[in-house]
Structures are given as structure tokens and as C-alpha cells.
Image (spheres, helix red, strand yellow):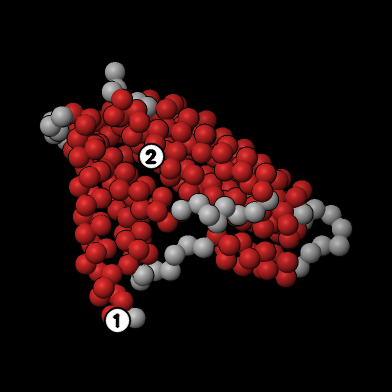
Amino acid sequence: MPNWTTIISVAGASFAASFVEAVEALTVVLAVGLARGWRPALSGAAAALAALALIVAILGPLMSFVPLRALQFVVGALTLMFGLRWLRKAILRAVGIIALHDEDAAFQRETRELSEARREAHGFDWIGALTAFKIVLMEGVEVAFIVIAVGAGRGLLGLASAGALAACIAVAAIGAAVHRPLARVPENSLKFAVGVMLSAFGLFWTGESLGVGWPGGDAAILAFVALFLAVALGLVAVLKPRAAALA
């Protein structure tokens, strides 16, 4: 039976990562809705959600046939690489080498490009619908991977899915209420935190799949979180003055 450390870590990581992905998808769907109309925006988003549900329905049952150790190794290695990629970009943003992600700027850019795109005088707006479909499907696939990454290692896919679903519902509800991109969400800080958590999970699952008995059991995840966080913050502290001097 998983302990509270694992449960909170899995649900929290899934929620935070999915929240970030949902915010980015919302920005483009809102741009489509305001620039091209809500019918193509919602139709494209709904079609993408249906495609995601089909993908999950097909791939989900297949995971039960994969031996747990093999599943842990593959998921752990991929999660570690995925988490380190997020963490690397978050560090570069914090240092100032990569520009911080700006949802308002992204929203304005998407709205401008969609407004300038050719529009059919009659009939369905396929450009708007395909734009919404592409972003929701792309971000949704990342959410699905994150759910598998943090939940499959201990058979907690249901818990990880609940965290992701709660995040997507929260973002959709806020977006429907304000009709604006969620620019005030500390997205880059969330990405930093998610990179740390995914890296910690990836290292834990990979080691466990290879038979490593981590001291403290699942509590080792918290130790890995602290380790990756300390290293990442140390790198930011060292690199930021150098990046500022070169700017």
C-alpha cells in the first residue's frame, strides 16, 4: 500500500505538470475563439480530447501485459530524461539565457496570426479548428505521458489521472470565466518545480527497476527532490551573474 509521501508526490506532480500544459493549450484555444469564432475553437478542442481518449483506451490495457520491472525501467528512464529537459530549460530561463514564457505575448501573437489567416466566406473554419486541435492534442499527449511517468511506477495511474484531470478542469473553468490567458500563473516557477519532481521520480523508478533498495523506501523521493532542487538552485546562483556579465 503506497504511503502518503508517494500519494502526495504523485498527485502533486501530475497536477502541477498538467496545469502548465493546460494553461498553454488554453492560450491558443482562446486565441482561436476570439479571432476565428468559438465554434471552430471548441470543435477542434473537442476532437482532440476525443482522439486522446481513444489513444488512452487503446494503450491503457496494453500496459497490464508489461512486466512491472520492465515498465518501471522504461518509464523511469524516460521520466528522468523528460524531467532533466524541463529542469534545464527552467534553469536557463531563471539565468536569463532563455526568455521567460509570456502567455500574454503568446496570446497576442496567436490572435494576430489567426486574424491574418485566410478565412472562407462560407462553411466551417478549418484553419481555426485545426489550430485548436493541434495544440490540445500536443499538450494532451504530454499530459498523458506525465500521468504514466508519475503513476505507472507503483500502479497509481488512477491517482495520477485524477491529479491531471483536476488541473485541466481548473484551467478550463478559470479560462471560461475570465476569457483571458492565465498570464498571472507563475508558469515558469511551476516548470522549475515540475522538472525537479519528474527528475526525482525518474531516478527513483529507474533505480528501483534495477533492484536498488533506496534507504527510507518511498521517502527517498523527497530526498531526490531536495537534491535536484539544491543542484538546480546552485547552478542558477553560479550562472546568473556570468550571464548578466555577458549580456
* Observer-nearest of 85 and 124: 85
Residue for point 58% across, 48% down: 136
* Observer-nearest of 128 and 17: 17
Q: What amino acid is found at the position of numbered circle 1 in the picture?
A: Leu
Distance Cα–Cα, label 1 vs label 2 = 35 Å
Residue for point 25% across, 69% down: 239
Residue for point 37% across, 64% down: 93
Q: Element at badge 2?
A: helix
Residue for point 47% across, 62% down: 101
Q: Element at badge 1?
A: helix
Residue 227 appears at what percent x and percent y?
Answer: 20, 47
Question: Which residue bears the numbered disc 1?
Answer: 246
Residue 74 appears at what percent x and percent y?
Answer: 29, 40
Q: Is residue 63 visible?
A: no
> With respect to residue 213, does 181 lie above or below?
below
| Disc number for residue 13 | 2
Residue 85 appears at what percent x and percent y?
Answer: 33, 56
Residue at the far top: name it: 1
236 left or right of 89 in image: left
Question: In which quadrant of the rendered image does the N terminus lie?
Answer: top left
Q: Residues within 10 Å of mark 2 (few under 14, many from 20)?
A: many
Q: What amino acid is found at the position of numbered circle 2 in the picture?
A: Ala
